[in-house]
């Protein structure tokens, strides 16, 4: 079930990206650079305003999962009703804020065209805000019920609609932002009702007891509030480097930094798909964390992420110059190839860090992850400033990698300490040696000679594969892989 649900999430998140790649050039051509730029800003504003659920969608998943595990069926309707009252109020507040700030926002986004067009677009998107915020709660119910097939049955068509809808409008109806945002708003409203329909099917009695609970209100706000702190600071740290590079180096240098970063961080879809499935499973009571099922989930999730992401990121690191040269030209590649290597290694580390991060948040310890991010933020700002000022783009990239490394260590350390997990029993020295082998392979990718680099890449993959098979895997895991390979080859031959 874990593999199947993760696969559903990958399809739901990944396939719309392919549609985006094909549709964006056409949208840019018809809307023009300026209008399309405003559209992307509106998308960004809506995404940021989505934080107005204050983490309640995630908090609802966590608490509902716990109630289901503890068989507290009588408390579930009250939990959902309290959550929905909060989400509806926050959604209306976010919509009003967007509506009232439309004129100011339009003046900031003005591109020399019709400001009223932008104001109208923002007003229309403001109408969607209550539905967007409510959807996070409805999705939380479906996640707690492990209904990831249903979630992605909605997510995929709505993700495609986000790009195809505007395309249809500009090609066959009217080439303006108001019409495009109206279509996007309709899509968000449909998505909300679709989530609601399936949530009621999964929990038919979810609103049978429409009773507000002050205790549940307090619990949701505390848990959701801490999650929101992480949700706000993490994106800030992700985008802060771009701003500081433009200040400490130059605006032109931002492109050489952002392009490889944006390219390789798309891999985060993979751990994101997995942790969405793990989150409700990690909501077991603290006393049950030591049970074998959760420990097995934790260990296997970390290992499978390394198994999947390490070859991808290693390939990107070794082929960084070729990838960037083919895509953007040799001159661009010369400035960005080492940054791509740095980001590739950082993506591997941050991917496995999402497992302990999900364990902490899923078990109601979101205040730990929030405090880690709050503590990291000022230190990262200062070091990024110094790194960019004195060591240029590579300095900024290395500081980014240092933050990712520290964050990964702290997530694992806090998980082990809080839940009294034994590193030696859970991962052990075998895992440390595996990560050292992978790290050494990344360092070897810095070799300049192309032929030698190709040889080292093949040698590294073979060495890592031999180590995993001969030493790292247990007998049961080897049998599992052999069975899967046998089934796969049998299906191909058939």
Image (tube, rainbow, N blue to C red):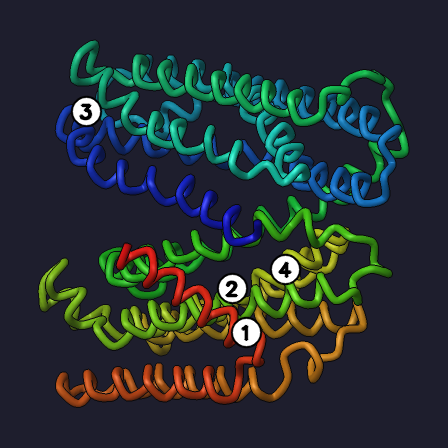
Camera-nearest label, 4 or 3: 4
Judged left or right of residue 421, residue 379 is left
Which numbered disc flags the more N-terminal residue, 4 or 3?
3
Compared to 283, does 144 lie above or below? above
User: What is the secondary structure assignment of the residue under circle 4?
Assistant: helix
Distance from Cα at disc 3 to Cα at disc 1: 53 Å
Which mark lies nearer to you, 1 or 2?
A: 1
Query: Is residue 436 visible in the rendered structure shown here?
Result: yes
For the residues bearing labels 4 and 3, Cβ distance under 8 angstroms: no
Name the quarter where the C terminus is drawn.
bottom left
Give coordinates of residue 452: x percent, y percent: 17, 90
Q: Measuring 81% from the left and 24% from the top, which residue is drawn there? A: 77
Residue toward you, 73 or 254:
73
Numbered disc 1: secondary structure: helix
Q: Residue 335: image x %, image y %?
A: 20, 70
Number of residues whose C-alpha sits closer than 10 Å to that of mark 3, classed few (under 14), some (14–19) or many (20 or more): many
Nearer to us of marks 4 and 1 is 1
Label drawn at residue 477: 1
Name the mark on residue 357.
4
Residue 299 picture location, percent across and down: 62, 70
Q: Which mark is residue 381?
A: 2
- Indicate which disc, 3 or 1, sits on the residue closer to the N terminus: 3
Q: Which residue is mark 3?
A: 31
- Residue 388 appears in the figure: no
Q: Are marks 2 and 4 in contact (CB under 8 Å)?
A: no
Q: Quadrant of residue 413?
A: bottom right
């Amino acid at each position: 079930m874990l593999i199947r649900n993760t696969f559903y999430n990958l399809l739901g998140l990944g396939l719309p990206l392919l549609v985006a790649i094909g549709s964006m050039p056409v949208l840019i051509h018809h809307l023009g650079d300026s209008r399309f730029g405003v559209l992307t800003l509106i998308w960004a504003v809506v995404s940021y305003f989505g934080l107005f659920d204050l983490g309640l969608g995630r908090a609802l998943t966590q608490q509902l999962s716990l109630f289901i595990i503890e068989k507290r069926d009588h408390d579930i309707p009250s939990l959902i009703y309290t959550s929905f009252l909060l989400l509806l109020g926050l959604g209306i507040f976010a919509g009003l804020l967007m509506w009232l700030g439309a004129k100011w926002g339009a003046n900031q986004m003005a591109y020399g065209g019709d400001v009223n067009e932008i104001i109208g677009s923002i007003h229309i998107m403001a109408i969607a805000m209550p539905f967007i915020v409510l959807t996070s709660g409805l999705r939380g119910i479906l996640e707690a019920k492990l209904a990831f097939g249903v979630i992605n049955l909605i997510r995929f068509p709505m993700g495609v609609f986000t790009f195809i809808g505007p395309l249809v409008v500009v090609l066959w109806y009217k080439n303006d932002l108001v019409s495009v945002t109206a279509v996007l708003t309709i899509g968000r409203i449909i998505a909300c009702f679709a989530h609601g329909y399936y949530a009621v099917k999964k929990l038919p009695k979810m609103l049978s007891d429409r009773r507000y609970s002050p205790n549940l209100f307090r619990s949701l706000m505390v848990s959701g509030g801490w999650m929101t702190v992480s949700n706000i600071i993490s994106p800030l740290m992700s985008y802060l480097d771009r701003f500081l590079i433009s200040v400490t180096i130059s605006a032109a240098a931002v492109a050489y930094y952002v392009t490889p970063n944006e390219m390789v961080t798309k891999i985060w879809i993979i751990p994101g798909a997995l942790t969405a499935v793990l989150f409700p499973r990690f909501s077991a009571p603290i006393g049950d964390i030591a049970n074998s099922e959760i420990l097995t989930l934790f260990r296997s999730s970390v290992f499978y992420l390394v198994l999947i992401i390490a070859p991808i990121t290693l390939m990107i690191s070794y082929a960084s110059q070729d990838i960037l040269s083919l895509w953007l030209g040799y001159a661009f590649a010369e400035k960005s190839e080492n940054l791509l290597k740095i980001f590739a290694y950082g993506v591997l580390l941050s991917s496995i860090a999402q497992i302990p991060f999900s364990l902490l948040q899923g078990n109601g310890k979101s205040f730990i992850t929030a405090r880690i991010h709050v503590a990291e933020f000022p230190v990262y700002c200062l070091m990024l400033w110094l790194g960019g000022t004195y060591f240029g783009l590579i300095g900024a990239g290395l500081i980014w990698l240092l933050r990712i490394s520290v964050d990964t260590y702290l997530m694992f350390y806090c998980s082990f300490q809080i839940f009294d997990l034994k590193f030696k029993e859970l991962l052990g020295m075998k895992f440390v040696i595996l990560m050292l082998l992978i790290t050494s392979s990344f360092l070897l990718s810095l070799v300049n000679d192309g032929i030698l680099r190709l040889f080292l890449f093949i040698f590294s993959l073979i060495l890592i594969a031999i180590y995993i098979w001969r030493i790292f895997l247990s007998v049961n895991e080897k049998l599992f892989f052999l069975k899967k390979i046998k089934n796969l080859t049998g299906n191909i031959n058939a």
